[in-house]
Amino acid sequence: MGRIRPILHPRAHDYGFLIRRWRTAARKRGLRFVPYASASGYELFYAITRRPAAGRPWIYLSAGIHGDEPATTEACLEWVTSTGLPRDDINLMVFPCLNPWGLVNNRRDDAEGRDLNRTYHDDAVPQTAAHKAALGKLRFDLALALHEDYDARGVYIYETRGPAPYLAEELLSAASRHLPIDPRRSIEGRSSRAGVIRRTITRDMMPEHPEAFVLFFHHTERALTLETPSEAHIDARVAGHVAMIERAVQLRLEISCP
């Protein structure tokens, strides 16, 4: 019998461990690590380029708004620690875990039973109100929100309709080295083509706004939601997300510097 390969991410639901690693990574990678809110006994943080420079694209990442999607939080950290930051070609803002209570308890919702990704229209929800306040008036050249899906048959992407060129197909190609692409033609009631759900969003299309709406309406022309299949091995899911992040940044830099 061959030797069993150890899992690379065995403590993916340990928020304290995640934050300790982020503190170390931020110091090494030229990022400030900033507390911006607290919820259910956990402090929430974002990481941001310490000395942002004019002319560099701003990149936004977020993870862990659903606590039962732990590959997202691991992937953000792994990309930051492996990408060679500090780097002189981008400015970066990362929200490493938007729902610490959910992560620790392996729950989609928060301690109050709310799906935080349906509360961005409501300033009475403290975590998401604080998130929006932390974003301020920043504009991003690219925004990626990392997610997972228990019903997925592979990796897929929601991409808001904005300026061409679109990125989703290239990102899925990068992820396909680690995960299959979801073949379904309809995903959660929306038309999908080879893993891509590309749609025009309007403020009135949903009564409860997800994070992607706030990003698209106020902060970016390019907002993508990356989904990996929760039933796949966590190491493959993390690798798939990292591959998509890296390819997205590469493509955005190519758009900036043709």
Image (spheres, rainbow, N blue to C red):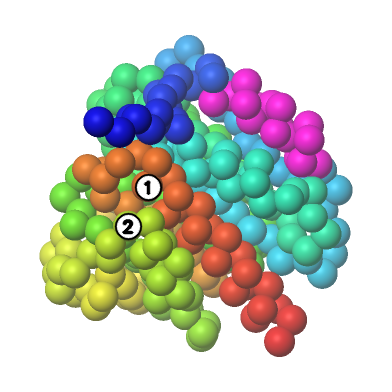
Towards the viewer: 165 or 140 = 165
Q: Which residue is mark 2?
A: 179
* Place of residue 44 in the rendered image (x, y in percent of width and height, measured from the top left): 56, 27
Q: Which residue is mark 1?
A: 236
Q: Which mark is residue 31?
A: none
Q: Which residues are magenta?
A: 18-38
* Place of residue 94 in the rendered image (x, y in percent of width and height, measured from the top left): 60, 44
Label 2, secondary structure: give it: loop
Q: Residue at x 28, y 70 (%)?
A: 195
Q: Quadrant of the C terminus?
A: bottom right
Q: Position of 218 compared to 63: left or right?
A: right
Task: Tell me the distance, in whole angstroms, between the alpha carbons under discs 1 and 2.
Answer: 7 Å
Can residue 141 be seen here?
yes
Q: Amino acid at mark 2?
A: Leu
Compared with 26, 173 (above or below) is below
- Say whether residue 30 is magenta: yes
Towards the viewer: 45 or 30 = 30
